Image: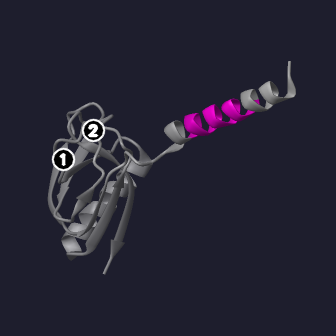
Amino acid sequence: MHRGNKRLIAAKAVQAIMMTGALVASPALAGSAGPGVVTRITGVPASTPPTILFYTNGPRTSAPACATMTDRWVIDVSTPSGQAAAAIVISAQAQGKTIYVTGTGTCSIWTDTETVNFLDVSS
């Protein structure tokens, strides 16, 4: 193989790897909201998994296409981390604190609502 062809193939391979990494690792589809406050909380203990749905009034950015309820978020409360997240949301609402929410970019728990990935509460 000619030296120029090897360089072209290597360059194409690097480009393909970089594009694949950008597609797989990109959090660009994850939504976020805030600053805002929690305006409503709904518990759905009979769902599988048991969940809470909550609404915020903060500006929303980058919601995934599945999240047609753009002011609503969902947490799976069947796990310790989900229970901790639910406690944060309930506490934020009770105290009237400002909340920032970041999602997973998926509606894996509730088909029209983005799943919560990260919460930040401030005074």
Segment colored magenta? 10-21
Q: Residue 98 location, x and y as percent?
A: 26, 73
Give the number of marks. 2
- Magenta segment's dominant SS is helix
Residue shown at 22%/75% (left/top)? 95
109 vs 27, left or right, is: left
Which residue type carries mark 2?
Pro
First in sequence: mark 1 vs mark 2: 1
Q: Is residue 1 magenta?
A: no
In this rendered view, identify the residue nearer to me: 11 or 39. 11
Determine the secondary structure under disc 2: loop
Left or right position of 9 against 46? right
- As drawn, the label of residue 43 is 1
Q: Quadrant of residue 94?
A: bottom left
Label 2 packing within 10 angstroms: few (<14), some (14-19), many (20+): some
What is the x, y in percent for residue 44?
A: 18, 41
